[in-house]
Image (spheres, helix red, strand yellow):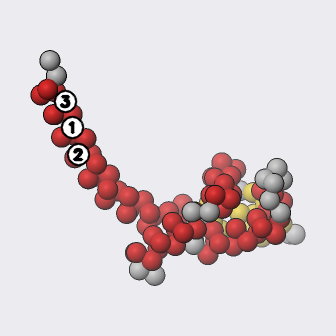
Amino acid sequence: MTQAAAIDTVLRTLADPTRRAVFERLVNAGEITVSDITRGSGVTQGAISQHLKALKSAGLVTERPEGRNVYYRVQPDGLTPLVEWMSHYGVFWRGRFANLKTLLKEIEP
């Protein structure tokens, strides 16, 4: 997968608010089952399973079967393409903010 395709996949996957909420729940929980994610979410277990499948396909989560349960956890490396892409723009904005700070000091009475 090319870098651009990887970025598109991560962005497209996290664009869905329910999927993003599931991802955030996994971030906070560490490792959790589908049943635990479903509880209190207001979403059916089937829907949660579909969202987890999309997150797994995008490389954002991994699963670990144990008996009758499957445990899901965040795969931090899945965000790498997005983080690298955003860091490029961080450099851009840091320079702009530095210029603004200089300008504001010059016009300060």
Front residue of this view, candidates 16 and 74 = 16
Distance from Cα at disc 1 to Cα at disc 3: 6 Å
Disc 2, SS: helix
Mark 2 and mark 1 residues within 8 Å of each other at the beta carbon: yes
Location of residue 95 with respect to 54 vertically, above or below: above
Residue at 12% x, 28% y is 106
Q: Which mark is residue 96?
A: 2
Indicate which disc, 3 or 2, sits on the residue closer to the N terminus: 2
Q: Which residue is mark 3?
A: 104
Residue at 32% x, 56% y is 89
Badge 2: how crowded within 10 Å, few (<14), some, or many (20+)?
few
Front residue of this view, candidates 47 and 31 = 47
Disc 1, SS: helix
Q: Which mark is residue 100?
A: 1
Mark 3 and mark 2 residues within 8 Å of each other at the beta carbon: no
Among all residues in the image, which is located at the extreme bottom?
Answer: 1
Question: Quadrant of residue 62 in the image?
Answer: bottom right
Mark 1 and mark 3 residues within 8 Å of each other at the beta carbon: yes
Counting from the top left corner in percent of width and height, residue 53 is at 69, 73
Counting from the top left corner in percent of width and height, residue 8 is at 47, 72
Badge 3: how crowded within 10 Å, few (<14), some, or many (20+)?
few
Residue at 37% x, 63% y is 85
Question: Quadrant of residue 14 in the image?
Answer: bottom right
Distance from Cα at disc 2 to Cα at disc 1: 6 Å
Badge 1: how crowded within 10 Å, few (<14), some, or many (20+)?
few
Amino acid marked by disc 1: Leu
Amino acid marked by disc 2: Arg
Q: Is residue 77 visible?
A: no
Distance from Cα at disc 3 to Cα at disc 2: 12 Å
Question: Quadrant of residue 109 in the image?
Answer: top left
